[in-house]
Amino acid sequence: MFPPIPAWEGLHPLIIHFPIALLITAPVLVIAGILFSNQRQGLFIAAFALMLVGSIASFVAVSTGEAAGELAERNDAVNVVIEEHEELAELTRTLFALLTIVFGAILFGPKLLKKELAPGVLSIVMVAFLLFYSGGVLVLANTAHQGGRLVHEFGVRAMMQTAAASIPSGSVSHSNDQQAADDDND
Amino acid sequence: MKILLQSIRLPIALALAVLALHLVLPMTSFAQDQKAATTLDNLQAAFNGESNAHAKYLLFAAKADEEGFGKVASLFRAAARAEQIHAANHASVIKQLGATPTADVKTADVKSTKENLQAALAGESYERDTMYPEFLALARKENNKDALRTFNFAKSAEAEHAKLYQEAHNNLESWKGDKMDFYVCAICGNTVKSVGFEKCPVCFTSADKYEKVS
């Protein structure tokens, strides 16, 4: 039987490993594509697919992370790490969204323009791309490290109950019922 | 007769077990109801506390203005705004639970600004270290995310208020003079002296949701 799917706030620990694994595996396929020219096209397309799914997962990871952060047990030390983790996560999301667009442009741009790059030129472009990509991986690793610290050093956990088990439904975070407080204060 | 008794022993035992289950299950349900009521009680207590704090800090602000501590007055007004936001957040969850938020707002005992700062610091420290941690523990146990969120927002802001009150109390003379600007998150009530971030560090709302209070 399939385990119950947690509510949005509880999805963070489930989703977070997808961008890490996919975005770190993608450059391995790019390197393989540079080395094995007869398999190049397929490997590059596979790398692009991993980057695309990994980048989409990073958007979901940031959103679920922010929702989980609202419910996290906080103190001054935790606040510092959460803030750093959140800022790095946003940077990671932006960087890999851009890198994926650039990689897609390198891969499909010449075809769209009906101008094929020479294999040697393509290899040089891909190596240059990998240099930029390694910067993204560095940021990703630091984001993951701060997330790991939150869980394993500070014991911050996401709430894992399913959406149906949430009591009650709805959210207070974007529904400031100011009038109610004003009325009661009067 | 003995054989008859032996043969009915098992059905009697089963009947007793079913009867016991019927007695125990409603008690379990009753206990769950009691837990939910406790979280609601905590929300009501928090709503009452925040509503009183809002009213009290406005009186403290007026006193600070009167004594020439403009910056302290600004801090009290910013904190009052934050408490108002917390009260509204608590009220929203209370309503979701089907109850009506109720507060008994009493007139605060206003003393000198230094004493008012001490009283405010004691109140915020209690909420940060005792009241909200207990409320959070129960809300977490009950998986009540909305209560957890609103308590979390309040606890984080109270911690900042305590720091600011401590700072003002320790350097009271330098807090004299004109009023100063504070910034309060309209969503969670986090209170800061300057907005040096893109997103609120407590609720991750865009920094442009911060309100300037002087």
Image (cartoon, coloured by chain):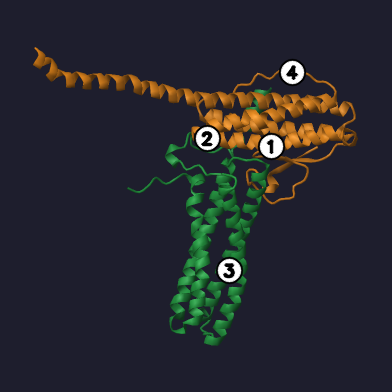
Q: Chain of mark 4?
A: B
Residue A45 higher or lower than B208, as above or below? below
What residue is at 63 percent from the left and 37 percent from the top?
A: B153
Q: Quadrant of residue A137?
A: bottom right
Rendered location of residue B37, percent (x, y): 50, 23
Q: What amino acid type is highlighted by mark number 2?
A: Arg
Chain rendered green: A
Chain rendered orange: B
* Mark 2 crowd level (few <14, some 14–19, many ≥20, 10 Å Cα): some
Tag of residue B157: 1
Q: Quadrant of residue A127?
A: bottom right
Q: What amino acid type is highlighted by mark number 1?
A: Ala
- Looking at this view, is A158 or A46 the one in front? A158
Q: Which residue is mark 4?
A: B107
* Label 1 SS: helix
Task: Report the Cα–Cα distance between label 1 and label 4.
Answer: 23 Å
Task: Report the Cα–Cα distance between label 3 and label 1.
Answer: 38 Å
Q: Which residue is mark 3?
A: A99
